[in-house]
Image: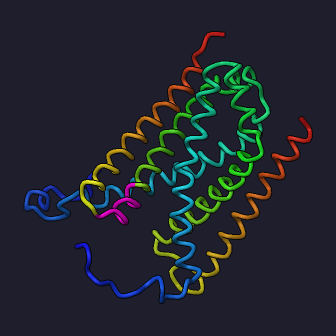
Amino acid sequence: MAGNPLSPHLQIYRPQLTSTMSILHRATGIALALGTLVLLYWLVAAAQGMEAYAAAQHCISSLPVQLLLVGWTFAFYYHLCNGVRHLLWDTGWGFELGTAYKTGYIVIAAALAMTVLTWACVLSKGAAA
Amino acid sequence: MKLQSDLSRVLGLGSARSGTHHWMHQRLSAIALIPLSLWFVTALLTHMRDDAVDLSNWIRSPFVTVLLVSLIGAMFYHAKLGLQVVIEDYVHAEITKIGLLITIKLGCVLGALLGIVAVLKISFAMT
């Protein structure tokens, strides 16, 4: 299998909304799989008692981790909304090019909006605490 | 739930491998994850400032315990299925591919166990 000549594809084919969103769905899925480790870290710390939990909360509230969490939030909402789009495709609906583009834009807008909304909540709670 | 008739199975028809099993389970876990993960995000927002005691009291509720355990199980199962196709798509060296697939599967099992045991420890702790 190795060493066979391949015709160029990525170098030639112009990125479209459909193909870009498809690979983004895969990328966000991988990112979320990695994010489960942070969730586990937090849960295990909570199970280990007050000191471990307080340390985990402190670590998670650091700026770099919070920025990562913002990224993961978007990855989550994008994967969720595009996942619903996939499930609709599974029923056979939405394959017309115009519909695919419309639903694609809706997914991106919804994911961005939900991310902003979530972090508005987080920041307002942070200010209140 | 096999969608294949007994006759066709006996005649050796249908997929030689597991057919649409992977595809179906990925959709099933996805459908389960929609409400579960949305619930979890809102719950996190509500409880993210809790100290250990308040968090414990919240997790203790049977509903929360079951939802958390379900979330963790569905999440790691869905992740395992998804990562499996990623590896199958991009890794073609057979030994490396099989090694990675085994690592992913066992890793997800471990991750799920860790998360579930952590939730249960909090839920059943004596206080």
Outermost residue toward the left in this view: B11
Q: Quadrant of residue A117?
A: bottom right
* Closest to the observer, B86 or A64: A64
Q: Is residue A72 above or below residue B123?
A: below
Q: Residue at x 59, y 45 (%)?
A: B36
- What residue span does the magenta drawing correspond to? B84-92
**Residue B114 left/right relative to B55:** left
Q: How is the image coloured?
A: rainbow
Q: Is residue A45 above or below residue A18?
A: above
Indicate left or right for B100 with A11 as reference: left
Foreground pick, B47 / A48: A48
The residue under the point 68% across, 51% down is A68
Relative to A18, say whether B80 is above or below. Answer: above
For the C terminus of chain B, which image quadrant?
A: top right
Query: Where's residue B95, x and y in %?
Result: 24, 54
Q: Position of residue B58 (x, y in %)?
A: 70, 26
Name the image quarter holding residue B90. Answer: bottom left
Q: Residue at x 55, y 79 (%)?
A: A18
Main secondary structure found in the magenta portion: helix
Q: Residue at x 72, y 53 (%)?
A: A70
Q: Is residue B67 magenta?
A: no
Quarter of the figure with residue A46: top right
Q: Position of residue B24 (x, y in %)?
A: 38, 57
